[in-house]
Amino acid sequence: MHKSFDLFFVSSNSHKYHEAKNILDLFGINLGFLKSDLKEIQSNSLHDIAIAKARDAFSKFKKPLLIEDDGLFIDSIAGFPGPYSSYVFKTIGNKGILNLVKNNRNSKFVSIITYCDKNYLESFVGKLNGKISKSQKGKGWGYDPIFIPNNSKKTFAEMNNKNELSHRYKALKKFSKWYLNK
Ligand code: IMP
């Protein structure tokens, strides 16, 4: 049943998988999904978290796979929530973030995509600068309703072309170039 997939995206988050699948389809890479909660280490480095997640995933599934770790870094609050974005989303959520951000609304989304198979452990970074909106706009998952990419007037949640410019797109584009030439 899994034979037609080139590799698997391991995550508990099906939104991330669907976006990654749409993006990799553009590069001719067929991505399967293994829904799984992976061990997440406490660290200030998204890169270290991603490597630990990829090792955990490969030890479980022993197949070529991708994992992703993301962070939303907000300038006026010292890069918070950064590596703690998932915990912060679950606790204070978008409403809590909007209460913390006042004048300087600059922020960036960072995605680390890590590929692991029996020979390789490689990471790819995608960064997208933007602003935190003044209120939640549009229906989307996670921080989508409060993140406005630079050069856009719409939040990720209001856009229909998020997958053509997101932090995830940028990291996966780098990955695809490497993967297709390896
Ligand atoms: P993690 O990589 O699962 O630790 O995710 C970090 C946090 O950022 C989670 O709360 C995600 O929901 C959120 N997040 C990651 N990427 C996106 C995105 O593209 N849109 C909205 N929220 C995101």
Image (cartoon, rainbow, N blue to C red):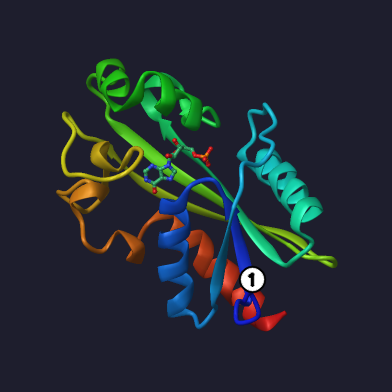
Q: Amino acid at mark 1?
A: Leu
Q: Residue at x 16, y 30 (%)?
A: 135
108 left or right of 147?
right
Residue 64 or residue 134, whichever sits in front: 64
Q: Residue 124, image x and y in percent?
A: 61, 58
Q: Residue at x 27, y 26 (%)?
A: 104
Q: At which x and y percent is residue 59? A: 81, 52
Q: Where is residue 16 shown, x and y percent of the image?
A: 45, 53
Residue 47 at least partly seen: yes
Residue 91, placed above or below residue 66: above
Quadrant where the N terminus sits is: bottom right
Dot 1 corresponds to which residue?
7
Q: Residue furthest front?
A: 1
Q: Is residue 37 left or right of residue 23?
A: right
In the rendered image, the vertical position of residue 68 relative to residue 180, given as above or below: above
Residue 2 left/right relative to 116 = left
Give the residue displayed 42% in from the left and 61% down from the top: 18
Q: In x, y percent, where is residue 148?
A: 25, 44
In the rendered image, the quadrant that contains the C terminus is bottom right
Instruction: Tell me which corner region of the image, top left, top right, bottom left or bottom right, holds residue 100.
Output: top left
Q: Taking the image as drawn, is residue 113 in sight?
A: no
View quadrant of ligand 1: top left
Quadrant of res 178: bottom right
